[in-house]
């Protein structure tokens, strides 16, 4: 055996032992003696490719292919190097002439998928799958391509076949779950994700993917421990910490969210998504100095583009430079910022400067995008209205006549309920009342929901006994104590905008409760709800169209007025339009109703708003401003867009004492 053959044997052995540096050195020695030997070039190219330099490997293998153009194995190796070098166009050129060889079809399909040509990739995977119909890995890749192409039904079929051929593959189950999610099969999707986690409970990648999917499906409570375990399991990708931050943020754990975003920036100081999420958190907490510092640091690092421009626009908005802020956002295209957030911003600024057509179309785009999210696609937007209407029908005079009064068995004081409908001024009102030294205000927490859960259906309320009433009261106060400390020495005010649809349950548990009904022009309320980017739930899905928004308002007010007709509710109404014109004139009667002394500090509600920090409602920015009247009658500027729903709202406009609508 000659010296070149011995050297090449040693080079091949080095490759087999993953010693690619030695393999390259040996191949280069042999190449000096035979510089046009395609086999030596092939070994060198493979060593370069496997050693982490696919570009050099591809170039070397291309030289070999010129010398041996009919060598099919060599052609495959060139294509593999091209794939690793992300030269997907070259993969296609190299292998298109090979025909329907299974390996060639598979690699071509992977190349097309990586290049973003998902339909072409799916077609190639289909040809490959015809040759290997029971190959789970091939079918898994095929299913992934179909998911990327948006062909979810086909993906489900293919991935189900993959799963049947490999029941223990967690990754196939994850992909099957993604396909089912894309096809609006949410329960089945989550079942797949959980099966995957059961197979590989300690696999950091599985935990990461499952946590990410649960977060996408609005389950931050379940997502958070999985994402945290993925981080502890060794995934140091900044995305995992961004997702952890998003989960904390969804759970209103703002301090922990900030820590997670900062960890992402520690791992990747130029990560744009981490900058965006942290910046949004600062703005929501009215921490404008921190936001300005974050933007400045990003610009010093050379981070530019539409995402940072959006954060800069948030600052311009707060400075009152509205036209400049709008122009900046409209002229830039963020890479990571959710289009929903961008359109909401465009809509609100356009509304402020009087460009109502631009504003309406921005809000329409925002809601259309929201309606396309996984958590929204399970609703049609009418479910909550239908539920409320079904309860209203059951609150008959006979139902009320069968009501048996019971004095509560404990001495705990009843809360004051503050609500009406969303966007009716409840956040402004609760912020004002927070400034009174004798109040304890809780904002949109789950006490009323827990109270209702402790009861049976609304039919059972009239004849409920002391034991059931005690269970409802205990559920309310148990949930109350999970939040900020309440000692019972202040007047408890529970701000919950839709307390109006739970009035019967509240009255059963707290028969002497007082109700503060926040009233605002129905057209302004419905328009304002349509303009908000609410987290989608069954109830909030109603606001994704202006028609369903109006129908929900109608259902809520029908229920509330029925409750007031058949139950002895103690109600005081605060009208938003009067409050913004004469705050003290509205507050004094309210304080008399609540049994509180007048306190002039209530008028300094802006200080209260700034001191409270994060405000969880969409009004977080407005309540730090001086009182303004621009929101009163705003709907008139959108009359043409709202014309189809005016007949729904007209009866309420007149009933609540506003000027009748011209239909």
Image (cartoon, helix red, strand yellow):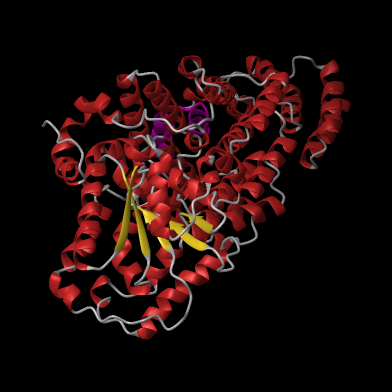
- Quadrant of image for the N terminus: top right
Instruction: Tell whether position 254 is magenta.
Output: no
Above-or-below relation of 358 to 267: above
Above-or-below relation of 283 to 500: above
Residue 615 visible, this angle: no
Q: Is residue 52 left or right of residue 338?
A: right
- Quadrant of image for the C terminus: top left
Residue 173 visible, this angle: yes
Q: Where residue 611 sits: x, y (%)?
A: 61, 43
Looking at the image, which residue sits at the far left? 663
Q: Where residue 65 sits: x, y (%)?
A: 64, 19
Magenta highlight: main SS:
helix
Q: Is residue 536 left or right of residue 279?
A: left
User: Which sits in the foreground, 344 or 58?
Assistant: 344
Q: Is residue 355 left or right of residue 65?
A: left
Instruction: Please name the residue shown 25% across and 53% down the image.
Output: 556
Q: Where residue 214 sits: x, y (%)?
A: 50, 53
Above-or-below relation of 488 to 468: above
Instruction: Tell whether position 125 is magenta.
Output: yes
Q: Which residues are magenta?
A: 107-130
Q: Where residue 561 sits: x, y (%)?
A: 21, 57
């Amino acid at each position: 055996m000659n010296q070149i053959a011995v050297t090449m044997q040693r080079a091949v052995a080095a490759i087999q032992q993953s010693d690619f540096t030695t393999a390259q050195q040996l191949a280069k020695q042999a190449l000096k003696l035979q510089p046009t030997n395609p086999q030596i070039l092939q070994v060198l190219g493979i060593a370069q490719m496997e050693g982490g330099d696919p570009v050099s490997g591809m170039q070397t293998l291309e030289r070999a292919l010129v010398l041996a153009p009919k060598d099919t194995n060599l052609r495959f190796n060139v294509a593999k190097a091209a794939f690793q070098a992300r030269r997907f166009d070259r993969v296609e050129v190299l292998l298109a002439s090979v025909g329907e060889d299974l390996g060639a079809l598979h690699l071509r399909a992977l190349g097309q998928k990586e290049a973003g040509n998902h339909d072409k990739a799916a077609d190639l995977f289909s040809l490959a799958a015809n040759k290997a119909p029971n190959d789970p890995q091939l079918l898994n890749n095929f299913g992934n391509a179909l998911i990327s192409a948006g062909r979810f039904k086909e993906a489900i079929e293919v991935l189900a076949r993959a799963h049947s051929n490999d029941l223990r593959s967690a990754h196939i189950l994850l992909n099957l779950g993604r396909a089912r999610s894309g096809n609006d099969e949410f329960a089945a999707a989550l079942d797949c994700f959980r099966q995957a986690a059961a197979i590989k409970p300690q696999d950091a990648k599985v935990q990461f993917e499952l946590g990410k999917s649960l977060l996408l499906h609005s389950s931050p409570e379940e997502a958070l421990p999985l994402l945290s375990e993925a981080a502890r399991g060794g995934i140091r990708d900044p995305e995992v910490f961004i997702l952890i931050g998003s989960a904390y943020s969804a759970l209103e754990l703002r301090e922990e969210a900030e820590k997670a975003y900062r960890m992402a920036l520690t791992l990747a100081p130029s990560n744009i998504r981490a900058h965006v999420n942290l910046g949004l958190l600062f703005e929501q907490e009215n921490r404008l100095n921190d936001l300005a510092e974050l933007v400045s640091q990003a610009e010093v690092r050379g981070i530019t583009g539409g995402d940072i421009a959006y954060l800069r626009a948030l600052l311009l908005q707060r400075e009152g430079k509205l036209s400049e802020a709008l122009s900046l956002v409209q002229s830039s295209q963020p890479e990571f910022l959710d289009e929903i957030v961008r359109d909401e911003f465009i809509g609100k600024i356009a509304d402020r400067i009087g460009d109502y057509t631009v504003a309406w179309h921005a809000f329409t785009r925002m809601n259309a995008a929201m309606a396309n999210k996984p958590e929204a696609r399970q609703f049609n937007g009418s479910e909550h209205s239908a539920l409320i209407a079904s309860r209203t029908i059951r609150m008959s005079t006979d139902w009320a006549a069968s009501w048996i009064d019971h004095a509560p068995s404990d001495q705990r004081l009843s809360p004051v309920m503050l609500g009406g409908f969303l966007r009716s001024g409840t956040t402004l009102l609760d912020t004002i009342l927070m400034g009174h030294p004798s109040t304890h205000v809780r904002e949109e927490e789950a006490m009323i929901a827990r109270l209702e859960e402790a009861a049976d259906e609304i039919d059972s309320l009239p004849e409920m006994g002391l034991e059931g009433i005690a269970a409802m009261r205990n559920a309310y106060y148990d949930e109350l104590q999970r939040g900020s400390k309440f000692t019972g020495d202040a007047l408890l005010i529970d701000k919950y905008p839709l307390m109006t649809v739970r009035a019967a349950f509240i009255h059963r548990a707290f028969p002497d409760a007082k109700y503060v009904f926040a009233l605002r022009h129905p057209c302004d309320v419905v328009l304002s709800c349509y303009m908000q980017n609410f987290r989608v739930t069954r109830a909030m899905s109603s606001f994704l169209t202006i028609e369903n928004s109006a129908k929900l308002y109608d259902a809520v007010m029908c229920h509330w007025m029925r409750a007031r007709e058949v139950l002895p509710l103690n109600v005081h109404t605060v009208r938003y339009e009067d409050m913004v014109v004469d705050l003290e004139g509205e507050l004094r009667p309210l304080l008399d109703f609540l049994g509180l002394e007048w306190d002039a500090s209530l008028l300094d509600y802006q200080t209260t708003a700034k001191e409270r920090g994060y405000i969880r409602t969409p009004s977080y920015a407005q309540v730090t401003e001086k009182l303004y009247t621009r929101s009163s009658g705003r709907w008139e500027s959108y009359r043409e867009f709202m014309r189809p729903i005016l007949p729904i709202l007209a009866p309420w406009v007149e009933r609540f004492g506003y000027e009748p609508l011209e239909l």
